Image (tube, helix red, strand yellow):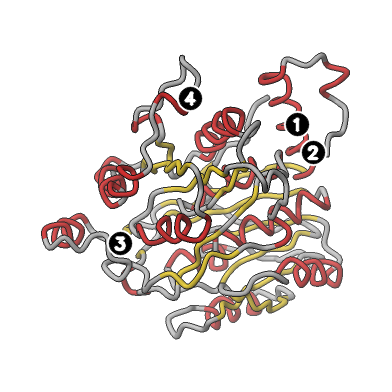
Amino acid sequence: MEMPTLEPCAEFRLQEGEAFAVAGGFEDRAVRFSEMLADPVPGSSAAILLRYLPTDAANRFEEVCSILEGKGLSTAILEYDRHHPATFDTRVLEILDRQAVNALCVDASGMSRLAIMVLLDIARERNMPCRIVYAEAEAYAPSKEEFEAAKALKEQHLPTSFIHTGVYDVIRVPRLSSIRMQNQASVVIAFDSFNEALCQALVNVLNPKRLILINGRPPRDELRWREEATRYVHRRLREEWPVDEAHFAPDEGAPEDELTTSTLRYVETYDMLVKLYWRFSTDHRIILAPTGSKMQTLGAYLLRAVHNDVHVEYPTVEGFFARKYSTGVRQTWQMSLGRMGTFVEKLRQKELREHLELPEELVNIEID
């Protein structure tokens, strides 16, 4: 099965009957695809614009709204409460029904990772044609100099050192939750970032038997220092929760560099998570936390979509240092996933063939 890939996007057009889901975040890249949206906009297309709660004066919601309405796009405003997102999916479904759209385009650039997963799951549930657009930032915080300065002062572990103001809570939404395997030991799979407090909160709240941290490898050479930096930020957690060969099959040792995936190429993350799922799922509850990059989040969602016994928990932050987050836009990308439900079903069948070696007549049986 050939996996869809991100392709450079020089021109952005909506299709007939397509809903454009975008968030009014504070980064420069949050407005890029709204600015790129080409005229004329199809009359049957529409937009869903997320307004973040708690509010932040730095958010560019009004700017995005003005751009979309200026291009004649029917725009539904949807509040997304980062701290209390349980009913988000219900309200999205109501808007989709009201707009009478039949396809979904998700702008992941300035969107909450949990919101991305929920929107993709709605597309899966309705088997809607789905595509993702993504604007890569020119510069990300912290800079190498800022990180080295914090490291020298031994402050690199503090959530207030870089881009977040702290952790609000570990949250979940019904759509991405699972009650299966609750009596079994749990393994939490999360991703490195510049905020160790996110993963520490997961450990404190969930008390897992095992913690597996997947690091991120930036695609650009000038950002490669961040791979080692985020690993360093989480070094204490790695010391407390070592992943050694005893956790894997005899031929599947896991040195740290093998638990690293691209922050842009989502397939690497999906493949890594599939390997971990089949290693641990028979006797562990799998808890997945999308704390990495936006494209690592896509890989995480696909694992959850294929395996609904995977339970998603998300450590949400209190707030952001908007001026420190990211600046500029480097490259714009798009990717079509086709009909989302069909795509997920093909992934499921692929896994059954590869990991269970089932005959074709059993592979095609619907499994809940």
- Spot the residue most to the front: 183
The mark lying in front, picked from 4 and 2, is 4
Q: Amino acid at mark 3?
A: Ala
Q: Is residue 6 above or below residue 87?
A: above
Tell me where residue 143 sits by quadrant: bottom left
Q: Residues under labels 2 and 1: Cα distance?
A: 6 Å
Question: x, y percentage for residue 297?
Answer: 54, 49
Which secondary structure, mark 4?
loop
- Of the numbered discs 4 and 3, the one sitting upstream in the chain is 3
Q: Residues under labels 4 and 3: Cα distance?
A: 35 Å
Residue at 16%, 58% in the rendered image: 145
To which residue does mark 2 refer? 342
In the image, taking residue 27 as reference, residue 172 lies left or right, namely: right
| Few, some or many residues within 10 Å of mark 1 (<14, 14–19, 20+) | some
- Of the numbered discs 4 and 2, the one sitting upstream in the chain is 4
| Few, some or many residues within 10 Å of mark 2 (<14, 14–19, 20+) | some
Residue at 44%, 85% in the rendered image: 57
Q: Is residue 130 above or below residue 44?
A: above
In the image, taking residue 106 as reference, residue 104 lies left or right, namely: right
- Of the numbered discs 3 and 2, the one sitting upstream in the chain is 3
Q: Amino acid at mark 1?
A: Lys
The mark lying in front, picked from 4 and 1, is 4
To which residue does mark 4 refer? 248
Residue at 45%, 55% in the rendered image: 203
